[in-house]
């Protein structure tokens, strides 16, 4: 399970996957200097690097209702954890560049890399901050199908003109609670008293 820093760590890890895949041998020189960063609404007006960039804009977080029903797991010390919080992160990946050609080249590279890396392991998830995820943890990154209307409505809410973008989601990001379930002592004896009831 991840700590409360898991949302930040997951978004950063997606950028790490992209930046570690800037191979001139595999993809040519067009993507070798492309950067990736996580942005908020106030960053849309920032300058675009000369070589281009990919920006990750997290626009919605939902609780995964299927994983929500799973019971809490026991720990090695015998204590039981509180139910974990399973989240799905919905975000846009936006290739930005000075020309349409560079933007479209970055787009194709970006989507190909994520298709080749659909599951991000804990070693990458913990690259920004150590110990956020357990060693066996991983997060899936999948393409998300949004209608044109949904994408345009989303762009209406940000302080920028429409730009080419691709919707993805990261699932399931599990956040554990640092609070343990309170457990009473084991039951050693049962007293069943079926005395007469006064009338």
Image: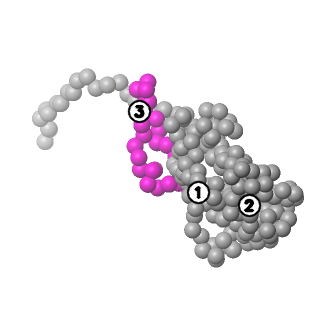
The image quadrant of residue 91 is bottom right
Mark in the foreground, 3 or 2: 2
Distance between the Cα atoms at labels 2 and 1? 14 Å
Magenta segment includes 43: no
Q: Is residue 41 left or right of residue 145?
A: right
Q: Is residue 112 left or right of residue 140?
A: right
| Position of 106 relative to 77 (above/below) | below
Dot 3 or dot 1, earlier in sequence:
3
Residue in the picture at 14% in, 38% down: 198
Q: Is residue 58 left or right of residue 141?
A: right
Dot 2 or dot 1, earlier in sequence:
2
Mark 3 residue element: loop
Mark 1 residue element: helix
Q: Which residues are magenta?
A: 60-85
Tell me if mark 2 has few (under 14), some (14-19) or many (20+) residues whose alpha carbon lies within 10 angstroms of its own.
many
Residue in the picture at 76% in, 69% down: 163
Q: Name the spot of residue 112 as percent of width and height, x first.
A: 63, 58
Quarter the C terminus occupies:
top left
Is residue 42 visible to the viewer in this orientation of the structure?
A: no
Q: Which residue is mark 2?
A: 106
Q: Name the spot of residue 116 as percent of width and height, x first.
A: 58, 53
- Dominant SS of magenta comes to loop
Distance between the Cα atoms at labels 3 and 2? 45 Å
Q: Which residue is mark 1?
A: 115
Is residue 77 visible to the viewer in this orientation of the structure?
A: yes
Q: Is residue 26 left or right of residue 179?
A: right
């Amino acid at each position: 399970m991840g700590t409360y820093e898991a949302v930040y760590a997951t978004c950063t890890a997606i950028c790490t996957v992209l930046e570690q895949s800037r191979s001139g041998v595999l993809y040519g020189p067009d993507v070798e200097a492309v950067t990736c960063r996580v942005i908020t609404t106030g960053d849309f007006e920032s300058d675009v690097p000369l070589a281009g960039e990919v920006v990750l804009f997290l626009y919605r977080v939902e609780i995964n209702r299927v994983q929500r029903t799973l019971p809490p797991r026991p720990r090695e010390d015998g204590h039981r954890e509180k139910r974990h919080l399973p989240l799905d992160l919905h975000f846009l990946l936006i290739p930005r560049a000075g020309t349409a050609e560079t933007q479209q080249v970055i787009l194709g590279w970006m989507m190909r890399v994520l298709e080749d890396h659909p599951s991000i392991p804990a070693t990458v998830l913990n690259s920004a901050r150590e110990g956020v995820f357990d060693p066996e943890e991983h997060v899936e990154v999948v393409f998300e199908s949004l209608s044109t209307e949904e994408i345009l409505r989303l762009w209406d809410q940000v302080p920028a003109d429409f730009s080419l973008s691709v919707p993805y989601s990261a699932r399931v990001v599990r956040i554990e609670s640092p609070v343990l379930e309170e457990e009473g002592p084991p039951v050693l004896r049962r007293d069943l008293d079926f005395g007469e009831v006064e009338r």
